[in-house]
Image: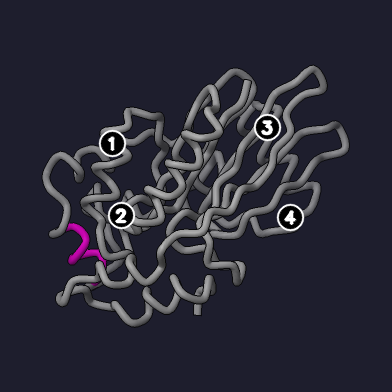
């Protein structure tokens, strides 16, 4: 069983297409999305509709809650812009996403099994990894949220994998990322894939009314949060 997990598209439809093409080339048995589809990048509607139309399982991210469920941070211009850019079907889709996706003993969440916004950092200690697996009731957990791909194991072989970010990696490598997990006789293993895409083309997609084009374009180009 091979499962591709991608997450944190954040409105970067150009990067999304590059990742989907690479996933199609690898031909996994399942594809799962880890959420945060719309907020930030230049094409929230295109990115959300593309994932929705794929028909793959997708879980709810914290920014999906903001733009889909109408509960954004107070007076956030980017959230308001993103909501306006989405059609009714996309807003309903984001609002209705589940908190987790389970495939046998693999669970995909956005941030943690108990929250869409709590942070499990790169290099998290054994206690936190154990909590992730215990609360997910799983042998492996894949997540996104922090935009930094990494993986860790517990002493009993449990696996926690961060799939990185499609649209805005924050590890200094601007290439889009996703994870490929495989279950074999010895349990789950994973590898992180990075995919180069046309960043200049993606930057040119920012419309004139985007509230923060320079900041988000810099993140695309540098692979850093800034």
Question: Magenta stretch?
Answer: 78-83
Which residue is the site of mark 1?
Answer: 52
Which residue is rendered at x = 50% and y = 37% of the image? 23
Residue 124 got which mark?
4
In the image, which is nearer the foreground, mark 1 or mark 3? 1
Q: Earlier in the sequence, mark 1 or mark 4?
A: 1
Mark 4 Cα within 10 Å, few/some/many (few <14, many 20+)?
Answer: some
Q: Is residue 13 above or below residue 95?
A: below
Secondary structure found at label 4: loop
* Total numbered circles: 4
Q: Are marks 1 and 3 in contact (CB under 8 Å)?
A: no
Where is residue 132 drawn, in percent x and y? 66, 40
Where is residue 68 drawn, in percent x and y? 24, 48
Secondary structure found at label 3: strand
The alpha-carbon separation of the residues under discs 1 and 3 comes to 25 Å
Q: Is residue 116 left or right of residue 214?
A: right
Q: Earlier in the sequence, mark 1 or mark 2?
A: 2
Q: Quadrant of the N terminus?
A: top right
Which residue is the site of mark 2?
Answer: 38
Looking at the image, which is closer to me, 38 or 126? Answer: 38
Q: Is residue 42 above or below residue 68?
A: below
Which residue is the site of mark 3?
Answer: 140
């Amino acid at each position: 069983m091979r499962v591709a997990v991608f997450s944190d598209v954040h409105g970067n439809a150009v990067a999304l297409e590059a990742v989907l093409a690479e996933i199609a080339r690898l031909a996994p048995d399942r594809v799962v999305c880890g959420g945060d589809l719309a907020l930030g990048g230049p094409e929230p509607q295109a990115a959300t509709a593309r994932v929705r139309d794929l028909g793959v399982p997708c879980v709810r991210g914290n920014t999906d809650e903001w733009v889909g469920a109408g509960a954004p941070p107070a007076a956030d211009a980017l959230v308001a812009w993103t909501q306006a850019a989405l059609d009714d079907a996309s807003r309903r889709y984001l609002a209705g996403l589940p908190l987790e996706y389970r495939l046998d003993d693999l669970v995909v969440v956005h941030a943690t099994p108990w929250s869409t916004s709590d942070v499990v950092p790169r290099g998290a200690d054994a206690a936190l990894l154990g909590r992730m697996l215990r609360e997910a009731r799983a042998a492996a957990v894949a997540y996104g949220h922090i935009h930094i791909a990494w993986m860790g194991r517990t002493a009993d072989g449990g696996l926690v994998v961060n799939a990185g970010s499609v649209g805005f990696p924050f590890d200094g490598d601007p290439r889009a990322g996703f994870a490929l997990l495989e279950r074999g006789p010895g349990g789950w293993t994973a590898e992180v894939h990075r995919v180069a895409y046309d960043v200049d083309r993606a930057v040119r997609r920012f419309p004139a009314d985007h509230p923060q084009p320079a900041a988000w374009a810099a993140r695309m180009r540098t692979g850093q949060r800034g």
